[in-house]
Amino acid sequence: MDIEAGAKESNSKKIDVNPRTNGTNSTNLTKNPRTEEKKWKKPLKKALLLVNQNAGTGNAKGKVFRLISGLVKLGYEVITYPIIPKMNITSENIIEAYKSRVKLVACVGGDGTLNHVVNALMAATDKEKSSLPVLYIPSGTTNDYAKTLGLSGDVEKVIHGVEHSRVYRLDIGTFSDKYFNYVAAFGAFTNVSYATPQDQKNLLGYLAYLVNGLASAPVSLQTRYHLEVSHDGITEEGDYVFGAVSNATSVGGFKTPALANASLSDGLFEVILIKAPDALQEIGEILMAAGDGSFDNPHIKIFRTSEVTFRSDNDIDWTIDGEYGGAKKEVTVSVIPQAIRIYAED
């Protein structure tokens, strides 16, 4: 009906369509409609960003601006803190203060930084599972856990993962009163990650681990730990040079076929135990067997479990996610299934 009315009007009145005329009708036809300007609105949701610029080779700061920009474009107000332990500006303190005010926790740093974030999130909730998802940009030296998750540190890819709600639901481990993401270990070479000075890590990267590992090899491989190991109704006793409870496909920067098929969300962790050999020359055979994945060696034992207890007459130093975990005579390591959500790259 409106079309018909427009046709009658065009027959009764001549319209000037000359672009050079000042006629009213011509002006109305050639004028572009006004574009409505978008007004900025303060975001209704908040993200907490924690930055450890000392992690790895110190390359974290180059990614921070792009990360903040990406989150802002997704509608987040980004609250940013540097990690400064000497001033008590730690993941634990910051997350405790903001836990009820944010919808996402992002961190830029190494696997050790992520360990602190996960511990803080678990301590900040009354439930066994954290409700806050984590955005992790790895910038450490070895990034074992990040490699297992397929996280390259590409800011744009992980922002895309946030946009499309792509998350991993991951198991974590309990170790005494602490939590860990991918490994709790004792014995040969396990102190290298936390004993290597940060300035060497910044300068040499992963080479620093190798240098310090070789330097400690004679002592590490000859130190024995007498233990009782209990799991799934079984208890065995022996002398060991190494033990690890892991949830990753690589440990210490090295991949091994023993962990190649490790699932990060099946409620089970992989346990690797290496018994102390009678002769020192057998150490080489053990390391070769572990390296090529054959494990055709009576000194190596691998099993999967949701809980394992280690008991010793003497204190044993442990490392957790590459950081010092304390000296313990007895510790029970157990799994909390799918306790943490971490954004995937998309």
Image (tube, helix red, strand yellow):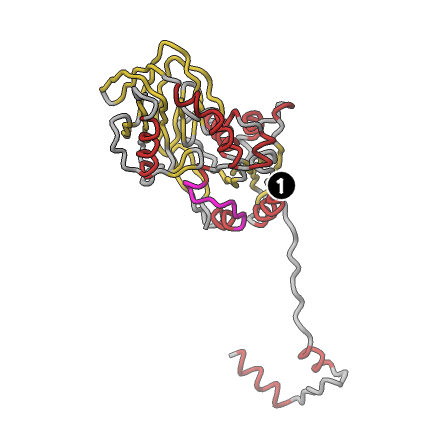
Seen in the picture, residue 170 relative to 216 is either above or below; the reply is below
Quarter of the image where one finds residue 253: top left
Question: Measuring 37% from the left and 14% from the top, which residue is drawn there?
Answer: 330
Which one is in front, 142 or 277? 277
Q: Is residue 150 magenta?
A: yes
Question: Measuring 28% from the left and 29% from the top, which residue is drawn there?
Answer: 302
Question: Measuring 30% from the left and 15% from the top, which residue is drawn there?
Answer: 228
Q: Is residue 304 left or right of residue 63?
A: left
Location of mark 1 (residue): 61
Q: Residue furthest right?
A: 22
Q: Bounds of the magenta span? A: 147-156
Q: Position of residue 317 (x, y in %)?
A: 44, 18
Quarter of the image where one finds residue 297: top left
Q: Position of residue 20 (x, y in %)?
A: 75, 85
Camera sees residue 124: no
Q: Position of residue 263 (x, y in %)?
A: 33, 38
Q: Is residue 225 left or right of residue 136?
A: left
Which one is in front, 341 or 109? 109
Q: Is residue 212 left or right of residue 315?
A: right
Which one is in front, 290 or 134? 290
Q: Residues within 10 Å of mark 1 (few under 14, many from 20)?
A: some
Q: Secondary structure at mark 1?
A: helix
Q: Residue furthest top?
A: 313
Q: Is residue 259 magenta?
A: no
Seen in the picture, residue 340 relative to 188 is either above or below; the reply is below
Camera sees residue 246: yes
Quarter of the image where one finds residue 276: top left
- Give, as a three-letter code, the residue at label 1: Lys
